[in-house]
Image: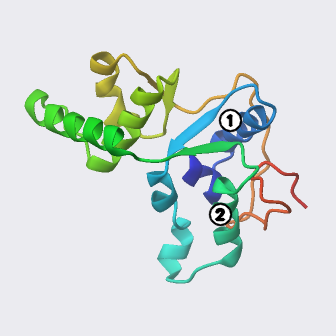
Amino acid sequence: MFLSYIEGNDSARLSHIRPLLDDADDNKLEIVTSALTIVEVAYAPYEKAASALDQSIEDAIAGLWAAGSPIRVVEVDGLTASGARRLVREGIASRRAIKPADAVHLATAMRLQVDALHTYNLKDFQRWQKPTGLAVCHPESDHPQMVAPTPTAPPRPVSQSPTAPRP
């Protein structure tokens, strides 16, 4: 979800992500993610392809985790790490393989007893719905917005909040 927001080039996804962030800003819902996400959301694909970094992308990424952001970052503690390890091991035995990083996200969601794990990576997470009892779905807003296509790089945020009005 956060990579899609930073990339800014999929208007269908953005039409759901921006309202979700706005709802979190308005305390209508809470968005939580593992601190591991800070590492995973490191660049926009065009930066990697060009082997060149864009400061506006770095600023947008940093804004996701900054104070005042609607996203709550949860530390990966020993209990969560142990839970993730158990999921990786269970995945081997049950033929529901899960990558260690995905297991951290799943264990975080389970530990926090969230309503749903929102991801565009349904393939790797849906097979865990039944054994964990955790709903897995695409990020979707109850009130998506029409979103105009954006340039390849999102414009520099005007504040630390990723949902702040754009110039």
| Image coordinates for residue 71, horizontal then vertical, percent | 65, 44
- Front position in the image: 160 or 149: 160
From this viewpoint, is residue 8 visible? no
Q: In which quarter of the image is the N terminus?
A: top right
**Residue at (63%, 49%) from the top-left corner?**
10
| Residue 32, image x, y percentages | 57, 38
Q: In which quarter of the image is residue 151?
A: bottom right
Could you tell me which residue is drawn at 47 percent across and 47 percent down?
75
Tell whether 102 sits left or right of 70.
left
Q: In which quarter of the image is residue 122?
A: top left
The circle drawn on residue 1 is none
Secondary element under disc 1, as helix, strand or loop, is: helix
Residue identifier under label 2: 62
Residue type highlighted by circle 1 = His
Which residue corresponds to the image point at 52% horizontal and 42% vertical from the top-left?
33
Where residue 31 appears, as percent x and y from the top left, is 62, 36
Residue position marked by numbered label 1 in the rendering: 16
Classify the position of the C terminus by image quarter: bottom right
Q: What element carries label 2?
A: helix
Work out whether residue 94 can be spotted. yes
Left or right of 64? Residue 104 is: left
Are circles 2 and 1 on residues that touch, CB within 8 Å? no
Q: Distance of mark 2 from mark 1, alpha carbons?
A: 21 Å
